[in-house]
């Protein structure tokens, strides 16, 4: 069975809806709902002890992309994350799951908000089947260190890419 990632919120290659775009309170000029999309996965390989999920924008004008969401230690029996699970105040993540620091400087989902006129950006949501129940990271661990841990502990991964563009 193939490890796959789908969403009730968007389809592969399609634009993300405004409910997933960064909210005005962040001060980057967007006015979305800042809700993480629903994600569902299936076909995890044998030996999976946990999952991790992240959202990365490889098109951000930073020289190193931009991490919008990082979640680790999602229990192995989990097969989906609800709409707005990335909101630390919502309490929608499975027990034991840990959100770590994004490029916004804090744990939790931060939606897309590329610079106006920069063209369409890709937002790559990835689910990782992890061979360890917990990774040795904390809420303030950077996405790069989480990525390092995932590099050595991933059995399989699946991606789903949404897009967003600001014209003004």
Image (spheres, grey):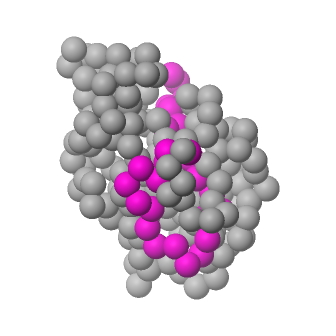
Query: Vertically, is 129 above or below 11?
Result: below
On the image, the x and y values in percent for residue 104 come to: 56, 28
On the image, the x and y values in percent for residue 105 come to: 62, 29
In reply to whether residue 87 is colored magenta, the answer given is: yes
Task: Tell me if 5 is positioned left or right of 165 in this view.
Answer: right
Asked whether residue 69 appears in the rendered view, the answer is: no
Say which residue appears at 43% left-offset and 67% top-offset: 80
Say which residue appears at 38% left-offset and 37% top-offset: 34
- How many marks on residues? 0
On the image, the x and y values in percent for residue 159 come to: 41, 58
Asked whether residue 6 appears in the rendered view, the answer is: yes
Say which residue appears at 61% left-offset and 40% top-offset: 107
Query: Vertically, is 56 above or below 12?
Result: above
List the single residue furthest toward the right: 136
Q: Quadrant of residue 76?
A: bottom right
On the image, the x and y values in percent for residue 50 come to: 63, 70
> What stretch of residues is rendered in magenta?
61-88
Task: Tell me if 83 is positioned left or right of 148 in this view.
Answer: left
Q: Quadrant of residue 52?
A: bottom right
């Amino acid at each position: 069975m193939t490890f796959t990632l789908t969403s009730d919120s968007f389809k592969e290659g399609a634009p993300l809806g405004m409910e997933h775009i960064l909210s005005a309170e962040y001060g980057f000029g967007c006015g979305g709902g800042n809700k993480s999309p629903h994600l569902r996965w299936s076909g995890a390989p044998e030996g999976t002890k946990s999952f991790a999920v992240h959202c990365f924008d490889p098109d951000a004008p930073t020289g190193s992309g931009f991490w919008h969401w990082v979640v680790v230690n999602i229990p192995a029996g989990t097969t989906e994350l609800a709409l707005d699970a990335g909101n630390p105040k919502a309490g929608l993540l499975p027990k034991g799951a840990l959100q770590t620091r994004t490029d916004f400087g804090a744990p939790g989902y931060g939606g897309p908000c590329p610079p106006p006129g920069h063209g369409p950006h890709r937002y790559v949501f990835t689910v990782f089947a992890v061979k360890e129940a917990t990774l040795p990271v904390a809420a303030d661990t950077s996405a790069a260190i989480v990525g390092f841990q995932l590099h050595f502990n991933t059995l399989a991964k699946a991606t789903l890419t949404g897009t967003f563009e600001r014209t003004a």
